[in-house]
Amino acid sequence: MRWKAVLRVGVAMAAFAVATTACGQQQGLGSSSSTPSVAQGVHFEPGTTMAKLAEAHTIRIGTKFDQPLFGQQILSGNLTGFDTEVARIIAGALGIPPDKVQWVESPSAQREELIKQGRVDLVVATYTINDKRRQQVSFAGPYYLAGQSLMVKSDNTAITGPDSLRGARAKVCSVQGSTPAENIRKYIDPAQLTLFDVYSKCADALRTGQVDVVTTDNVVLLGFVSNSNGAYKLVGDTFTKEPYGIGIRKGDVAFCTFINDTLTQAAKSGAYANAWKTTAGKVAEQTPQLPTFDSCS
């Protein structure tokens, strides 16, 4: 069942546009200089997730709190990053303003359970779509295509890519329940792998010499590199493809379709590109194109 929205004339496109007014409370590399427009007078088919959220005038969104450029809580308490901007665009299309978004910290290992238990309405958290996760939740998108990489100290010359890890006996850090943690196992022995619940702990372990390498998606690592004052670097090329999706309750095809339609309109209006440029685009060179969506199921 596809979603239906009745909007006042001229408002439909505004639901997906991003205004250029500055957000004075946000600051730092990961902060956004824009706030999303909020649709007015929206109406959705009764009984749909969209109708329930629009009527409640609030939404619970799961995201990361510790990933520069994508989802990071800064000193003011605000959340900044590309993931949070994408989430605000979706909320705005439902008629929900940014101050009515309830953010729920969603570490990698907890994302499926948060959705299944109804503790969040959706998850935007560098969430790679894969078949194992599809058994538990549904995904809208993907909205971004990343690739796994390696981060080391700037003076490390022994690590040049994943094929060098086993020979160098490198201690590698990743996060429990993440796709990168599973992908890296083919390149190392089990004793070489250390797992934490969040990537910031891996970055701290690299800084203190407890591990030699941190591995996750390239754009996530790029945030840590940019904040390290030259202490860290990325090595080698990306060696996987990681399509980031928006996790929702399994089987909610109408909500998936609505989110995909919202992302499509955001790409047409420039809101998607602006969300990137004001966050990850401050470090990454190229603005991405919205990927081709998977089918909603």
Image (cartoon, rainbow, N blue to C red):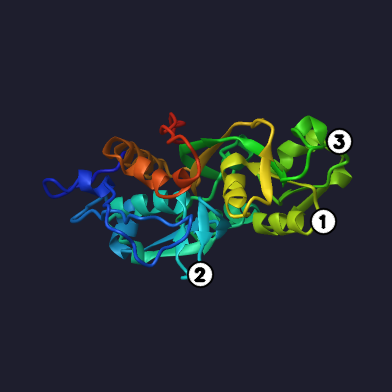
Q: Where does residue 120 sit, x and y in percent of width and height?
A: 48, 59
Q: Amino acid at mark 2?
A: Leu
Q: Which residue is mark 2?
A: 75
Question: Is residue 48 at all visible to an observer of this figure?
Answer: no
| Closer to the camera in the image, 142 or 275 | 275
Which residue type carries mark 1? Gln
Residue 266's place in the image compared with 236, above or below, is: below
Residue 111 sits above or below residue 101 on the image: above
Q: Rounded to the nearest whole Å, what is the CA distance between mark 2 and mark 3?
A: 39 Å
Q: Nearer the viewer, residue 1 or 271?
A: 271
165 with respect to 23 (left or right) = right
Among numbered discs 1 and 3, the one appearing first in the sequence: 3
- For residue 211, say whether it is visible: yes
What residue would you read off at disc 1? 210
Give SS at disc 3.
loop
For mark 1, does the 10 Å Cα neighbourhood hold few (<14), some (14 to 19), or many (20 or more) residues?
Answer: some
* Location of mark 3 (residue): 166
Q: Earlier in the sequence, mark 2 or mark 1?
A: 2
